[in-house]
Image: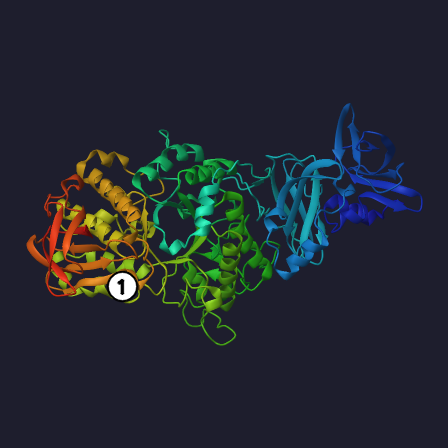
Amino acid sequence: MAPAPAVVDAILSGLHTDPFAVLGVHNSVDGFVARCFIPGAETITAMGLDSTTLGELNCLHPDGFFAGNIAVKSIQPLRYRATRGDVEWSVTDPYSFGPVLGPMDDYFVREGSHLRLFDKMGSHPIHHQGVDGFHFAVWAPNAKRVSVVGDFNEWDGRRHVMRLRRDTGIWEIFAPDVRAGSTYKFEILGIYGDVLPLKADPFARRSELRPQTASITTGELEQDWDDGDHIKHWASVDKRRQPMSIYEVHAGSWQLRDDGSFLSWDEMAERLIPYCVDMGFTHIEFLPISEHPYDPSWGYQTTGLYAPTARFGEPEGFARFVNGCHKVGIGVLLDWVPAHFPTDAHGLRQFDGTALYEHEDPRQGFHPDWNTAIYNFGRSEVLSYLTNNALYWGEKFHLDGLRVDAVASMLYLDYSRKDGEWIPNEYGGRENLESVRFLQKMNQQVYAAHPQMMTIAEESTSWPKVSQPVHEGGLGFGFKWNMGFMHDTLSFFARDPLYRKFHHQEITFGLLYAFSENFVLPISHDEVVHGKGSMIAKMPGDDWQKFANLRAYYAFMWGYPGKKLLFMGQEFAQWSEWSEKRALDWNLLQYPLHEGMRRLVRDLNLTYRNKPTLHARDCEGEGFEWLISDDVEQSVFAWLRKAPDCKPIAVIANLTPVYHEHYTVPLPVAGRWREILNTDAEIYGGSGKGNGGRVEAVPQGHDWAAASLSLPPLAVIMLELES
């Protein structure tokens, strides 16, 4: 039975919303009939997958619509032999195959509890009903029609119109004979019948190199993982009591090739991994590496959360990099951006012609700071998309953790908004309760599925219990960036030492809340961009004082309770502000002061890692005790770091240029204390003043002692009890 002319016209014009009801193999009163649309064909012969001829089809429309009876006993996949003149080609009919997704997928998708969407959505190579090809699936519930278009069908939206699963709003199709490496997008007919700009695949696992924006079909990730011991270790320990010194890296500008192009992941592995091993860092944290169109966004405006950016090669390269890090005991963290997304036409905004991933009301769905769209955390499908992405990085790439960007902007409905520019929650408050539920669910799922992972919140307010478990009313993060520490201490160290006595509390205040969360102390990229200058440029005084101040600041931070994070280039005191357009100024290492700074950071890392006293109680008040907190006039601070069954370590900071030859410091135990670090040592570029390696603490009562110390100018020393 031939379809009505209007149906044929709808197929030919790409307006038919359910071509599976028309094309492919169907049972009719006259037996089985096959119908196909193959533009450019003059004749069509229907064949089985074994090349058996099943019948000749009749041309019902010269644009390429054919139909005819075929000699089969049941519905089955077909191939067509098409000819035009003396040209002959073969087409496997996508409409002769059944669906791939099943009712359980529909159930879990509707419930919002599907934890393996990354194996179902997007594009995946499969062997389906005897044929190799790619399965495509995309969520677009309000679309009138969705097609997958690509270099395999001449970007013709009429060739692979997808099947709608009405219960979930997911469109799917099995495209036979499509190979890995094909470019593709989705062509969507919006709710009002308009053809939208072509959309990249939200679940794409590989993308084109910018400025191109298509997704790329790719095989399942292949990596021979050799990191079992690393994964087992981090899954079994209390991460709060482990040393964590994080090297924050922008992969596109740490180093470049001689011609100025990006390093590949393999080239980066050859250089960055040995560097971090030598420097003593425990983790590398990358600024976002998900696919993004605009280099100056540094990856924070991503259009492809599931695709490692093509700037550094194929996804397997990143997997090899992570594996290489793990083999030498270095963890890999990713900056992750679930707070917002850019409004590029090929991205998520107005994905099916409606506000699908974002809120429709700009008071909820548009971010005024970044001109980006805000995810609608009230939609279970959006929550599943983001939560699955967090799980994806843990499972497929063995990541050690996610640093979650801009958490504060997610928690407050009035973030960066004036009165009248935001909508209160159901209780009239400013808290984004939907976002809170998302963060709690994401953290619970990550820690349950991948206990080796950690999540770290960049959260700059006093929101309570950010790094406390969900069952205790917390958000469930493992750690939180201590933005207060960063702001206060940078403010103090940037001042002329003459005036520091008037700002003493900028150092002491942080200890009032230092153990309210599990903190990471961040000297991140945010402190060396947008006109803020580099760390060394922030320091006061002449060059010698600038370097002495910065050495003291780093040692102060490494002796302070909390995990450590330092952005690349600051470990050797780069003078220029960081720019993503150029590599770091590695030539500075030929100068003694810069090389001395690098050596100090290396020794700080090794001391911090090798002395459990300095890390085992980073997040617990029992590990800290003030020795001197009130010497306002001389800006001298001293404290004790402690851990069970470990020798105590005293950290003493003299934060003025005045050299004290005989300064009395109280210590808890009489006896010999060894100087294990001195930032004024000549090897670091200092003046070489110190205590000859050891000091003697003499009893001052039955429960305390004191030592007379030489305190170098603008310096920090660390003393460990020797006996």
Residue 350 in the image, given as x and y percentages of width and height: 57, 56
- Nearer the observer, 544 or 68: 544
- Nearer the observer, 132 or 277: 277
Q: Residue at x 89, y 42 (%)?
A: 32
Q: Is residue 248 left or right of residue 86?
A: left
Q: Is residue 97 visible?
A: yes
Residue 425 in the image, given as x and y percentages of width and height: 50, 72
The residue at the far left in this view is: 661
Residue 415 in the image, given as x and y percentages of width and height: 41, 65
Q: Residue at x 75, y 30 (%)?
A: 90
The residue at the far top in this view is: 86
- Nearer the observer, 29 or 648: 648
Residue 293 in the image, given as x and y percentages of width and height: 47, 44
Q: Is residue 617 left or right of residue 219?
A: left
The residue at the far bottom in this view is: 427
Q: Residue at x 49, y 39 (%)?
A: 319
Asked which colour scheme the image uses, the reply is rainbow
Q: Is residue 296 left or right of residue 160?
A: left
Q: Is residue 374 visible?
A: no
**Label 1 CA crowd tier, 10 Å (few <14, some 14–19, many 20+):** some
The total number of labels drawn is 1
Judging by the rendered image, the residue that carries numbered circle 1 is: 510
Secondary structure under tag 1 reads helix
Which amino acid type corresponds to the residue marked 1 in the rendered image? Gly
The residue at the far right in this view is: 30
- Nearer the observer, 265 or 541: 265
The quadrant in which the N terminus is found is top right
Q: Where 70 sits versus 694, above or below? A: above
